[in-house]
Amino acid sequence: MAFFLAIGQTLWVRLGLYCGEARSLCPERRGFALCSIAGQEPLTTGASVNPFKCAVVCVAVVATCGCEQGQRTAPAPSPESATSIGMEFKLIPAGTFIMGEGDDAHEVTLTQPFKIGVHEVTQAQYEQVMGVNPSHFKGANNPVEKVSWNDAVEFCRKLSELPAEKEAGNVYRLPTEAEWEYACRAGTTTKYSFGDDESELGDHAWYSENSGGKTHPVGSKKSNAWGLYDMHGNVFEFCQKPTREYPYRVLRGGGWYGSGGASCRSVSRQVESPYARTSNYGFRVILTNAHK
């Protein structure tokens, strides 16, 4: 009996650790783990514990939890193109603007027009290309988040390798800081793409004052003058290359959580490790063509 009791206790300890780690995946199974085989008597320490029941329950519940977590759905067929997963792009004209503010303000000329995503990359789009959805705030049309700069670059690489994109010579990448700010400003010189009045920010952005502590579907606020959505708020967006802050990467635009409207201004920027993943970080992409 002592031998079976030891087995039962060992399995019970292991079960506690196992289901504790997996509680987000099978909470209903954890509830079952606290009951006896008959579903009546709690399996607690004490002389009344039946070692045979304990062993059977532990094995049964571990098997149940393990099977559920171990299941993997068959991978979905790879999409053919960015268009096939609903990605839209706007052609931004070439031009000159004042980038930055204060002592950092300087004139920048973009000599070529470029295409940038109308929206931040969504969870549905990311999952179709990458096969996973790492986001904390689940929603197919919400921006993907909890992605690092490295993840965003890999998404661009895989998107560029899709059959139709490769045949067309299309190459996807993150925007440079200059491209991002130019596109965000949409011809303006004000704090925001819509003007200087922060009281209007809620019409254009999900940020700390109106987000309710979470992300929201892309495109559900007003666009800027060039038809781009969520350039202010929802999630911070990674830019292409490190600058003076190497090896850190730059994020622009502000997010659902942050220091109010200040972090959503057109010039606002912050730096982060290329490995960092938070529910406040996402990205949008630039479309270029190798044949042009």
Image (cartoon, rainbow, N blue to C red):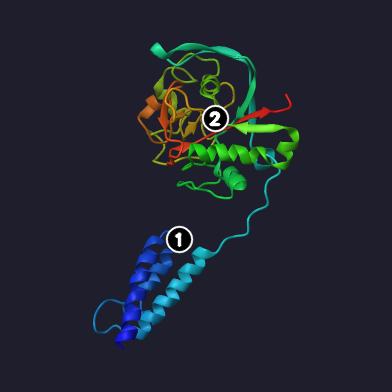
Secondary structure of the residue carrying tag 1 is loop
Residue 226 location (% of width, % of height): 59, 22
Q: Which residue is mark 1?
A: 25
Outermost residue on the front side: it is: 247
Tell which circle, 1 or 2, labels the residue nearer the N-terminal end.
Answer: 1
In this orientation, which residue lies closer to the viewer: 267 or 112? 112
Identify the residue under disc 2: 229
In the image shown, does 31 or 279 lie closer to the viewer?
Answer: 279
- Name the amino acid type tagged 2: Tyr
Where residue 63 appears, x then y in whole percent?
47, 73
Given this view, does label 1 or label 2 mark the residue nearer the observer?
Answer: 1
Q: Residue furthest right?
A: 167
Left or right, 65 with respect to 15, comes to right
Measured as percent of width and height from the top left, residue 258 is found at 37, 33
Q: Are marks 1 and 2 in contact (CB under 8 Å)?
A: no
Q: Is residue 143 visible?
A: no
